């Protein structure tokens, strides 16, 4: 089973559409074929972003429904303790917490739509950065 860190943009895309690769990844997680790795900070970011008014308008879930979905998602996640921080590594400070989850957990991959934002750190930490569709196409 692959252990992955999902960037927030992957989770939001999965909430917004049932047709894309992000939703397919969420299904694989629900089926136990992927394990999402999260820190407390990353999970709180998921919650904050998914409850933004523009996100609610896009995905159509009430804040209460988002809470229920995230509660179910949390039961499928493996918690990660952040033992080391290497900030700053990335241009966007918000991406640092995603990177910290991936590095501290020794994730098999960090899954994001912002490949170029993580590219410098990928080399430093020998981290595999993939788009959702690329992870779906990758053999076990």
Image (cartoon, helix red, strand yellow):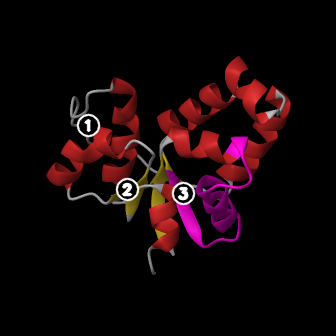
The residue under label 1 is 85
Left/right placement of residue 110 relative to residue 22 reads left
| 5 or 78, nearer to the observer | 5
The residue at 67%/31% (across/down) is 50
Do callouts 1 and 3 mark residues in contact (Cβ within 8 Å)?
no
Seen in the picture, residue 45 relative to 132 is either above or below; the reply is above
The mark nearer the N terminus, 1 or 2, is 1
Point out residue 140 in the picture as x, y percentages from the top left corner.
46, 81
Farthest residue to the bottom: give it: 140
Do callouts 1 and 2 mark residues in contact (Cβ within 8 Å)?
no
The residue under label 3 is 36
The residue at 74%/53% (across/down) is 18
Secondary structure under the numbered disc 3 in the rendered image = strand
Q: Residues within 10 Å of mark 3 (few under 14, many from 20)?
A: many
Can residue 52 be seen here? The reply is no
Label placed on residue 61: none
Label placed on residue 105: 2
């Amino acid at each position: 089973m692959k252990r992955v860190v999902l960037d927030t943009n992957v989770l939001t895309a999965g909430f917004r559409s049932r047709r894309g690769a992000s939703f397919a990844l969420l299904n694989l997680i629900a089926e136990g074929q992927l394990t999402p790795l999260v820190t407390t900070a990353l999970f709180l970011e998921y919650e904050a972003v998914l409850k933004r008014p523009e996100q609610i308008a896009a995905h159509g879930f009430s804040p209460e429904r988002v809470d229920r979905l995230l509660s179910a998602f949390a039961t499928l996640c493996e918690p990660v303790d952040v033992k080391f921080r290497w900030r700053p590594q990335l241009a966007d400070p918000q991406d640092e917490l995603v990177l910290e989850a991936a590095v501290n957990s020794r994730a098999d991959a960090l899954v994001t739509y912002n490949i170029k934002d993580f590219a410098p750190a990928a080399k430093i930490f020998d981290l595999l950065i993939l788009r959702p569709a690329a992870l779906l196409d990758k053999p076990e």
